Amino acid sequence: MKIFNAQEVAAHLQWQPLIDSLSTIFSHGCQVPVRHHHTMELAGQSDATMLIMPAWIPEQYAGVKIVNVFPDNPRKSLPTIMGQYLLMDGASGASLALLDGAELTARRTVAASALASRYLSREESSKLFIAGSGRIARYLGLAHAAVRPIREIKVWSRSPENAAAAAQHYSAAGFTATSTDSLEQGTAWADIISCATLSQEPLIRKAWVRAGSHIDLVGAFKPMMRESDTELICRASVFVDTRSGTLAEAGDLLIPIREGRFEAGSIRAELEELIRGLHGGRLDREEITLFKSVGAAQEDLAAAICCYEHQQGQQPS
């Protein structure tokens, strides 16, 4: 069995092949049971979350991810997300590879955002505003730039120092990048607004969003978490990675539903429907589009296959 550490996962998951692999698995389909989602109470710390996410393509590949989300880990100089992914032969059940789950999760998360952006953002989008400064926030610009001509990036974080460090990360990658202390100014400036936080209160408000913008919400993943206000959800054309996942976990949608302001039937499409051409995506230049993701097991499986086959010298299937 091949073991991939975080650096090896990163090396084998380049953005364009990974985005294409996600597109392929959503297009062709696979078996995805409901994931297990467990809260772990910790004395003197925020509750942690354990996720167990299986998926398989019959006769080809099977896999399961066990990932832990510990919100207070940055205070200990540890990553928020830790875990492992086990990839298996779908015909025999034999173990093929064990992959670093945190790196795989971060990369497939931003790849899903970029894949959605192919259908939902305006083709000429060049200005990206990022709320957040962690690992996923530092990958979002790279992934979005694989599908759109992103040249300028602004970064906001509750920690100005972290925002400045993330902006420097993007400057070193060749972007014109700065940090900002204003969510309102960053939102109003951008073509694409991308959030990767664990916020429990709205960060992006409808009043700040200009016509034609695309909103990408990838952080909040519990019913009490949210990165957008209710007015934005009601105004935007809302798309999701999967209806089952977002309607079970995404506070950005569940809170407006509980308020009686939004209905599940108002979701325009999920990612699979966009890829299969069952929905046309963005309708016009003035439309405000919004993509909400909470992660899906087929994304993890696609990423694991892409990494494993790249290491084996194969083209991802």
Image (cartoon, rainbow, N blue to C red):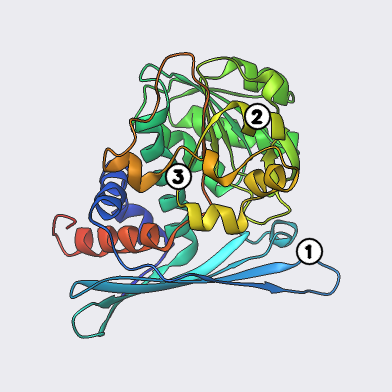
Residue type marked 1 = Ser
Does 47 sit above or below residue 149?
below
The one of 262 and 255 positioned closer to us in this rendering: 262
Residue type marked 3 = Val
Residue type marked 2 = Leu
The residue at which mark 3 appears reads as 110
Q: How crowded is mark 3: few (under 14 residues within 10 Å), some or many (20 or more)?
A: many
Determine whether, in the image, residue 169 is placed left or right of residue 184. Answer: left
Q: In which quarter of the image is the C terminus?
A: bottom left
The residue at which mark 1 appears reads as 46
Q: Residues within 10 Å of mark 1 (few under 14, many from 20)?
A: few
The one of 145 and 177 positioned closer to us in this rendering: 145
Q: How far apart are marks 2 and 1 (CA)?
A: 28 Å
- Residue 292 placement (x, y as % from top left): 53, 43
Circle on res. 232: 2
Name which of mark 3 and mark 1 comes first in the sequence: 1
Does 45 sit above or below residue 96?
above
Badges 3 and 1: C-beta atoms under 8 Å apart?
no
Does 29 sit above or below residue 57?
above
Q: Distance between the residues labelled 2 and 3?
A: 22 Å
